[in-house]
Image (cartoon, rainbow, N blue to C red):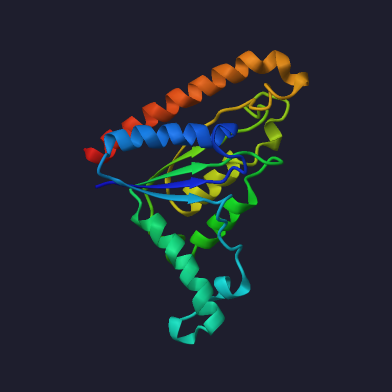
Amino acid sequence: MATLLHIDSSVFPGEASSSRSVADAFRKAWQEQHPQGTVIYRDLAASPVPHITADAWSAGYAAPCEHTPGQSAAFAARVELIEELEQADAVLIGAPMYNYSIPSTLKAWLDNVLLLGRTAGPAPSAQGTPAVVVASRGGSYAPGTPREGFEFVQNYLEAVLQGTLGLDLDFIVPELTMAPRNPAMSELVPLYEASRERAFQDASAKAKQLAKRLAA
């Protein structure tokens, strides 16, 4: 039975969040293909993981027998998150753009799961695991747009998820999500609606493609 690790990080609930809505469409299509499968779900807005601490960091580079009580507790929390990643057959992450970057809660999760010598290094323990990121954003930061140089979500996640953790990474990018709420962007509403529809179609298609790939 396949296991999907689903991470949400938007501060907005349900339909108010583009990243949650599109990720939910992916998850539903995935579950249709894997009705007996498992979904490990973490809502980082509702239940944030601890930001990395000195104890949690240093414990990763010391033998367990040398851990202080503080290091042992902090590292146990990291190991739980790491094992969820390692046990997943696929990873789904909702990563909205906040102030040109990812939410701090998602950064905290990444800091916890990235451990040199285990999930990072010459042979990352989750290497090759397919990962789909729903990278929503209020405007457009696509190549050729005026704010192309302010795109730090995909660039960063490519470096961490693909370049460091070794995941097989793919993106779904619903953009211009502020158009319906910002009068100055009203003329962009049709482009927003087209982007949203395309994102939902991509979510369903990519979930089904990935299910076939894992079943092969």
| In this view, 168 is above or below 186 | below
| Residue at the image position 62 percent from the left and 13 percent from the top | 190
| Residue at the image position 23 percent from the left and 39 percent from the top | 215
Residue 50 image offset from top left, x and y in percent:
58, 63
Horizontal side of residue 66 vs 11, given as left or right = left
Q: Nearer the viewer, residue 12 or 9?
A: 12
Residue 98 image offset from top left, x and y in percent:
67, 41
| In this view, 111 is above or below 53 | above
Q: Residue furthest left?
A: 216
Horizontal side of residue 192 vs 33, given as left or right = right
| Residue at the image position 45 percent from the left and 35 percent from the top | 24
Horizontal side of residue 209 vs 49, given as left or right = left
The quadrant in which residue 201 appears is top left
Q: Nearer the viewer, residue 26 or 132?
A: 26
The quadrant in which residue 193 appears is top right
| Residue at the image position 67 percent from the left and 21 percent from the top | 180
Residue 29 image offset from top left, x and y in percent:
35, 32
Count the labels in the image.
Answer: 0
Residue 58 image offset from top left, x and y in percent:
56, 75
- Residue 171 makes an appearance in the image: no
Q: Nearer the viewer, residue 174 or 27?
A: 27
Horizontal side of residue 161 vs 168, given as left or right = right
Q: Quadrant of the C terminus?
A: top left
- Residue 2 makes an appearance in the image: yes
| In this view, 199 is above or below 35 | above
